Image (tube, grey):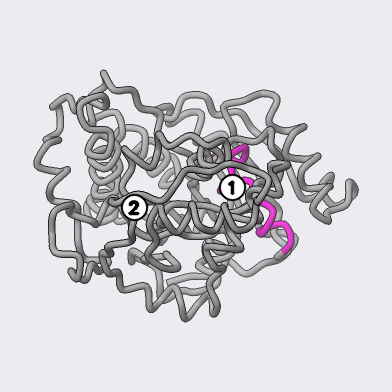
Amino acid sequence: MVTVPPTSSALVVVTGVGSQLGSHTALAALKAGYRVRGTSRNPDCADLVRAAFENNGLTRVHLGSHLEFMIVDDFASEAQWRRALSGADAVIHTALLLLRADLLVGPAISQVLAILHAAKKTPTVKMMVMSSTFSTIVTPGLPSDTLFTAEDWNEASLSMADEGETVSNEANPFHFYAAAKTRAAQAIWRFMDTEQPHFDVTGVLFGAIYGPTLSPRLALSQSRWIKFALDNDISPSRTIPTTWFTDVRDAAQLQILVLRTPELGGKRLIAGAAAYGWNDVFTILRQNFKSLTVPENFEGGRSSGPLFDNSIATKLIGTWTTLEKSLVDFGRSMGY
């Protein structure tokens, strides 16, 4: 097991650097002392991210020597990933899988395998941190007091998504998303077992990622659901189930800490702060944004579990950011 300590010579590739999670992760890596190469599909991303980082305490001189960008617009292209990973010591893969409702779950697997194979052909890579989601472990329909651990998989969504079977996003958006993410996550561990690469992999599983954006022009994660609520739109609350949440700043910091924690190599890490429900969201927004009209609480909006063993992540992070701070800071960062 290895570590990648934060030095000015250590290069960390952060994929999806133009996203909410990717930008926070790159910022945390830079502040910790790493050099960062961010990848994005968007050619305009570099200027947006640089400006956001300058607005969050980093100097232009520091960014000039420690931050670079590369376009990766085909996640299934091993050649593109090999160029992006060249000379890297570590990879933090936050980029979302490119999927459509009419695609098979299979492409999710090919996309994650492309970056793994590229890393295997890059001898400098020592560690890979693969961002994932609670939806890969939660099996809907089990009792609310069920305790899920890093050993669990989402069996309900898997049953709908044998490789090669189309899963309709319109028919069941949760199962479509969860099946793709779960198959891709399992493919990572099959790769590690069969290929025996020279690097370690740690999977970090997040709840719904909320918290401030570094710039309203950068891509949002699940925080876009909170924007709906701030705009008095109930749509997400009626179609998207809640489990636990993770503040984006905690998520970013945890991924950086993994690089210095060798015992997490080869493991999945449950990284969520606490359970929540839509009524918690609406109540917090109503109390803190009094000039706005936000949706009313509703019968199915209470938190109902399930339970997760987040003890390892809690030991690493210390104190989790609260849901109230996460939501309020997001609203303020968006100009509400």
* Quadrant hosting residue 180: top left
Residue range in magenta is 16-31
- Numbered marks: total: 2
Task: Estimate the spatial distance between the alpha carbons at disc 2 and disc 1, rounded to whole Å.
Answer: 39 Å
Q: Taken as a whole, is the magenta stretch helix, strand or loop? A: helix
Tell me if 329 is positioned left or right of 194 in this view.
right
The residue tagged 2 is 301
* Few, some or many residues within 10 Å of mark 1 (<14, 14–19, 20+): many
User: In the orientation shown, which residue stands out farthest toward the top?
Assistant: 102
Name the residue nearer the viewer: 259 or 310. Answer: 310
Residue 35 to residue 37: above or below: below
Q: Is residue 85 visible?
A: no
- Residue 328 position in % (x across, y down): 63, 56
| Residue 23 among magenta residues | yes
- Towards the viewer: 330 or 290: 290
Q: Residue at x 44, y 37 (%)?
A: 96
Res. 9 in view: yes
Amino acid at the residue labelled 2: Gly
Give how far across and how far down residue 8 sits, in percent.
75, 61
Which amino acid does the dot numbered 1 rest on?
A: Val
Nearer-the-camera pick, 26 or 193: 26
Residue 277 is left or right of residue 170, and the answer is: right
Residue bearing the label numbered 1: 13
